[in-house]
Image (tube, grey):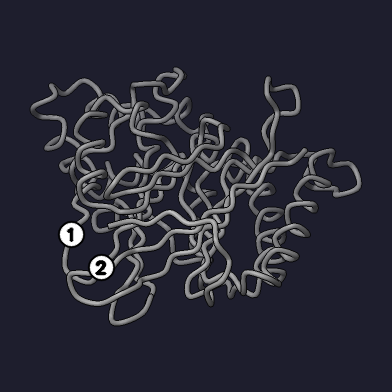
Amino acid sequence: MLHFSDSQDRINLMLLLHISDIHFRAPDCVNPDLDPDRPFRTRLLQDARERTTTLGPVGAILVGGDIAFKGDPQEYRAAFAWINDLAQACGCTLERVFVIPGNHDVDRGIITRAPSTRNAQQAIKQASSQRRERELRTQFSDLDAGKALLAPLAAYNDFAKLFNCQVYPPERLYWKQDLPLQDGVHLRIHGLTSTLLSGANGQDDERTLYLSPLQTVLDPVDDVVNLVLCHHPPDWFTDQDEIHDDICGRAAIHLFGHKHRQRVMQEVNYIRFAAGAVNPDRNEAGWRPGYNLIRVDVNGAGQDRTLDIEAHLLEWQ
């Protein structure tokens, strides 16, 4: 059972900092003095540092994709420097920083130039709904086809290796990591890869992506709290109904990004957060940079044990 709280009277046991859609954009981010978005990232860092003096140090930073703007290696160098500063400000080690890719982490130029990538994407996209899961497994399990599928994420993967969050064929379609809570309970973070079909044929991604049951096993074992970290929310996938059922039935905490809308939705057995965007486009309607601080506590014992969630949803004004 979940209990939603806004109190601050308990000792922090696991404080999560959830950010998404940072959009480091080259060439702006290469020279900090000429980067119009830098002041908003600085304000976020300062705000997080101030709040964690009260809430306690951050136990993990969860970065929900769109770290870069166009998958440029320069963008990731700037991103690493800022994330390192953010981690230090919040008392979090780099070993507790976890990242996943978003559509802006895909180098679409590689898709345009590489027939092998387009062929692998199309084989999955054009498979019937009954055969799509098998086709994804076949493509990703083949070393050459799997590498072709991940080629547009090459610069992202070089960055993700710094946090042991890279994906690679045939074993690692997504990653998972356990963090201890208390009383023998672990928080199991599932970092999902929602971008395998992103940018196919130069098209927009809405409702054309495919996640598959291969990424939503989310085994609901005893003494484990499953947390899903995924860039795209379920309604962006062709298999959205199956994803929704699997995630809602097996994971207590859901963290999404992409839509640049900061939201929280609470149900009896799960809670879902949208992170907003650290740096939405400044010309975007309803421009509101934001981030989330989420505290996770286990209270009670046995059948009376509850998962308590304290949420701080912050927006720039």
Q: Secondary structure at mark 1?
A: loop
Left or right: residue 80 compared with residue 248: right
- Mark 1 crowdedness (10 Å alpha carbons): few <14, some 14-19, many ≥20: few
Left or right: residue 210 compared with residue 28: left
Q: Secondary structure at mark 2?
A: strand
How many numbered badges does the structure rendering display?
2
- Measured as percent of width and height from the top left, residue 97 is found at 53, 65
**Residue 224, numbered label:** 2
Measuring 21% from the left and 51% from the top, which residue is drawn there?
250
- Measured as percent of width and height from the top left, residue 208 is found at 33, 22
Residue type for callout 2: Val
- Measured as percent of width and height from the top left, residue 68 is found at 61, 43
Is residue 159 visible in the rendered image? The answer is: no
Q: Are marks 2 and 1 in contact (CB under 8 Å)?
A: yes
Measuring 75% from the left and 57% from the top, which residue is drawn there?
47
CA separation in Å, label 2 and label 1: 7 Å
Viewport quadrant of the C terminus: top right
Measuring 17% from the left and 58% from the top, which residue is drawn there?
219
Measuring 31% from the left and 54% from the top, which residue is drawn there?
252
- Mark 2 crowdedness (10 Å alpha carbons): few <14, some 14-19, many ≥20: many
Q: Nearer the viewer, residue 121 or 222?
A: 222
Is residue 282 visible in the rendered image? The answer is: yes
Residue assigned mark 1: 220
Residue type for callout 1: Pro
Q: Nearer the viewer, residue 240 or 125?
A: 240
From the viewer's perspective, is residue 178 above or below residue 199? below
Viewport quadrant of the N terminus: bottom left
In the displayed orientation, state which residue is furthest to the bottom: 183
